[in-house]
Amino acid sequence: MAAEAETKDADASRRQSRRAAVMLLYQEDITGHAMADIVSQHERDANRPLPAYSRQLIDGVHDQQTRLDGEIDELAQGWSIERIAPVERAVLRVGLLELDQDDPPAAVAIAEGVALARRYASPEAAAFVNGILSAAARTRGKGR
């Protein structure tokens, strides 16, 4: 029972960290402000430091953004990265980055991306994110 509760807490924490990363990447995209300033403001507003997993995702997206955007361009047939809404871009970048890792499993990375798109964009955006992340998982040999 204790291990089960610990796993649920870790999943919730990771979910919150992922959401924070997506929101901060979105803010950076639409405002053009430096991420350091955005993180500082977030930490002041939240009255706590940004979770380590959020920082890991943000740093990973920054380090690999050219590659991630190229993959999105390739998979989003008929849509260039510039035409994709900023929140969807942030969700896709984080989702693709997570698909490159062994943890979380691909199904979790996809489901979390879809949930974020549904929550912060629209059902249509969620379907779009699902299609791209699922195709990316298949190219990595991690999906059906």
Image: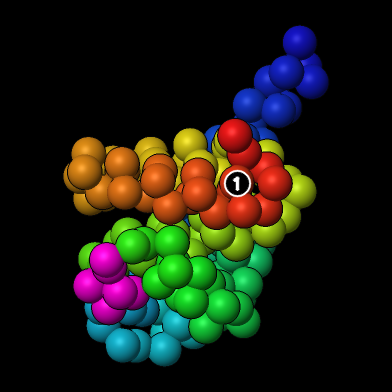
Q: Residue 117: percent from the left, percent from the top? A: 32, 47
Residue 134: in magenta span:
no
Q: Residue 62: percent from the left, percent from the top? A: 55, 80
Callout 1: SS: helix
Residue 82: in magenta span:
yes
Q: Residue 31: percent from the left, percent from the top? A: 26, 83
Given residues 87 and 137, the one toward you in this image is 137
Whether residue 17 is visible here, answered yes or no, is no
Residues in magenta?
Answer: 78-83
Colour theme: rainbow
Q: Residue furthest top?
A: 1
Q: Residue at x 43, y 52 (%)?
A: 132
State the quadrant of the N terminus: top right
Q: In the figure, is residue 142 to the left or right of 48?
A: right
Given residues 10 and 60, the one toward you in this image is 60
Vertical position of residue 94 compared to residue 33: above or below: above
Given residues 55 and 130, the one toward you in this image is 130
- Residue where numbered disc 1 is placed: 138
Number of residues whose C-alpha sits closer than 10 Å to that of mark 1, classed few (under 14), some (14–19) or many (20 or more): few
State the quadrant of the C terminus: top right
Residue kind at label 1, given as amino acid type: Arg
Q: Residue at x 60, y 46 (%)?
A: 138
Vertical position of residue 12 compared to residue 40: above or below: above
Q: Residue furthest front?
A: 77
Q: Residue at x 31, y 49 (%)?
A: 128
Q: Residue 77: percent from the left, percent from the top? A: 33, 62
